């Protein structure tokens, strides 16, 4: 994989130097850097620091795809946010993301040249050093799809063909086309701006590393389905239900008696405070009426939208049809603002169903870490119920 390289006229170093005086530059990377901090190149870090762990955590530095004698930054704030979103530190026991990347305004030192991987795009630059002027965003809450959407138009395959269409459709490489994949088949298989790593894992039967697994996190009971598989399952199940005239929608006032009857036997909804909005999603059959419901509570998580799944219930005659799986994901898709985190509780026997919907399920009794702006809160578990969660979208 490589990024687009365009031929341009003139000396790029001269153009970069002329433009640097009127540009502002942003760096997306590890959090916690203070004003005045000097960004080190990978080579300097290896010489001067006891560990290069913070550099290894940034995409590219540990892969040897960047120049070890340069630091990197961008003249586009949203591109910086995209690169910051690649940094994520997970809780050792549960896999919940507890640290996210930050964006800084920086002042480069030394000659500024274009990033070779983004030549001609005017997006990415590098120099022998840079200094932090201020923190712009201490924790960037962009999911992987949103990050790719900000840089996807510049990404190409090795033969310089585009990796994404203007609308975010994933375009197969020459090798993928040789295996029989077409633009049409990719569009039906993946949502817009699906990260390359998700596609690669899906086509090769591997894992992305974005879903926590028991082998790496001791409190995980059931590993969530991979992102691409979750999306494909949701689209398939939704299409099957729609073919029967079944719709998933927000509840109306007249639906409440049926909703109350459905959730009468479910655990009491979580209560998080008066400032939160509670929403109800229902699944309706043209003849049988409301056959399933989900109750959700919208909240804020470090200033970002999140939601709690308080209850999910399906009438007995309609169980084992994938309706609960559709509900768990449709509830998120119906929200006005995409949540950065979603969580709920279930009995252990339902762990496979919840994991199929793309949620990681923790063991009974395991606490759920909730990373706030200045600390990590632990939400205690119970011996008969499991926390389940998802960082990012369906």
Image (cartoon, helix red, strand yellow):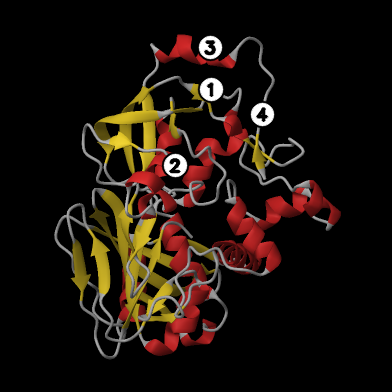
Residue 43 disc label: 2
| Residue under numbered circle 3 | 15
Q: Quadrant of residue 152?
A: top right
Mark positioned earlier in the residue sequence (1 or 2) = 2
Q: Position of residue 78 (x, y in %)?
A: 42, 33
User: Does label 4 or label 1 sit earlier along the sequence?
Assistant: 4
Residue 363: x and y in percent read 35, 84
Is residue 289 at least partly visible in the picture? no
Q: Position of residue 244 (x, y in %)?
A: 63, 69
Q: Residue at x 45, y 56 (%)?
A: 333
According to the picture, the residue beneath numbered tag 4 turns out to be 5
Answer few, some or many: residues within 10 Å of disc 2's Cα (few below 14, many 20 plus, some between 14 and 19).
Answer: few
Could you say which is closer to the camera, residue 49 or residue 144?
Answer: 49
Left or right relative to 364: residue 113: right
The residue pinned by badge 1 equals: 122
Question: Of label 3 and label 4, which has the lower sequence position?
Answer: 4
Q: Nearer the viewer, residue 22 or 293?
A: 22
Spatial distance from mark 4 to mark 1, Cα to Cα? 11 Å
Quadrant containing the N terminus is top right
Question: Disc 3 and disc 4: Cα gap in Å?
Answer: 16 Å
Q: Earlier in the sequence, mark 3 or mark 1?
A: 3
Crowding at label 3, few (<14), some or many (≥20) Cα neighbours within 10 Å?
A: some
Res. 341 image quadrant = bottom left
User: How far separated are the C-alphas under marks 1 and 2?
Assistant: 25 Å
Relative depth, front residue between 109 and 132:
109
Q: Nearer the viewer, mark 2 or mark 3?
A: 2
């Amino acid at each position: 994989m490589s990024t687009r390289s365009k031929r341009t006229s003139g000396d790029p170093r001269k153009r970069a130097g002329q433009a640097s005086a009127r540009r502002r530059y942003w760096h997306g990377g590890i959090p916690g850097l203070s004003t005045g901090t000097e960004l080190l190149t990978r080579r300097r870090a290896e010489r001067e620091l006891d560990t290069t762990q913070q550099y290894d955590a940034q995409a590219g530095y540990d892969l040897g795809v960047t120049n070890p004698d340069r630091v990197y930054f961008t003249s586009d704030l949203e591109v910086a946010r995209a690169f910051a979103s690649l940094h994520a530190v997970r809780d050792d026991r549960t896999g919940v993301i507890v640290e996210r990347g930050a964006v800084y305004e920086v002042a480069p030192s030394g000659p500024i040249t274009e990033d070779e991987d983004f030549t001609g795009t005017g997006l990415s630059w590098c120099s022998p050093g840079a200094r932090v002027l201020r923190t712009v965003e201490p924790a960037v809450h962009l999911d992987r799809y949103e990050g790719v959407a900000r840089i996807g138009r510049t990404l190409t395959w090795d033969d310089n063909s585009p990796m994404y269409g203007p609308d975010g459709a994933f375009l197969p490489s020459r090798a993928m086309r040789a295996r029989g994949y077409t633009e049409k088949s990719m569009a039906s298989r993946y949502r817009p701006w699906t990260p390359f790593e998700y596609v690669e894992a899906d086509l090769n039967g591997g894992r992305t590393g974005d879903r926590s697994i028991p082998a790496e996190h001791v409190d995980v009971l059931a590993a969530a389905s991979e992102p691409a598989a979750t999306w494909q399952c949701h689209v398939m199940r939704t299409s099957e239900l729609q073919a029967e005239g079944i719709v998933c929608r927000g509840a109306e006032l007249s639906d409440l008696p049926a909703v109350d009857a459905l959730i009468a036997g479910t655990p009491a909804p979580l209560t998080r405070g008066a400032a939160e909005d509670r929403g109800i999603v229902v699944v309706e059959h043209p003849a049988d009426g409301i056959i399933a419901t989900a109750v959700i509570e919208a909240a804020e998580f470090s200033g970002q939208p999140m939601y709690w799944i308080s209850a999910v219930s399906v009438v007995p005659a309609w169980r084992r049809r994938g309706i609960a799986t559709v509900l768990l994901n449709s509830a998120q898709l119906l929200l006005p603002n995409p949540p950065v985190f979603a969580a709920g509780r279930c009995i252990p026997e339902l762990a496979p169903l919840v994991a199929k919907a793309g949620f990681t399920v923790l063991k009974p009794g395991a606490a759920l870490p909730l990373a706030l702006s200045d600390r990590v809160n632990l939400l205690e578990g119970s011996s008969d119920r499991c926390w389940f969660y998802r960082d990012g979208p369906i």
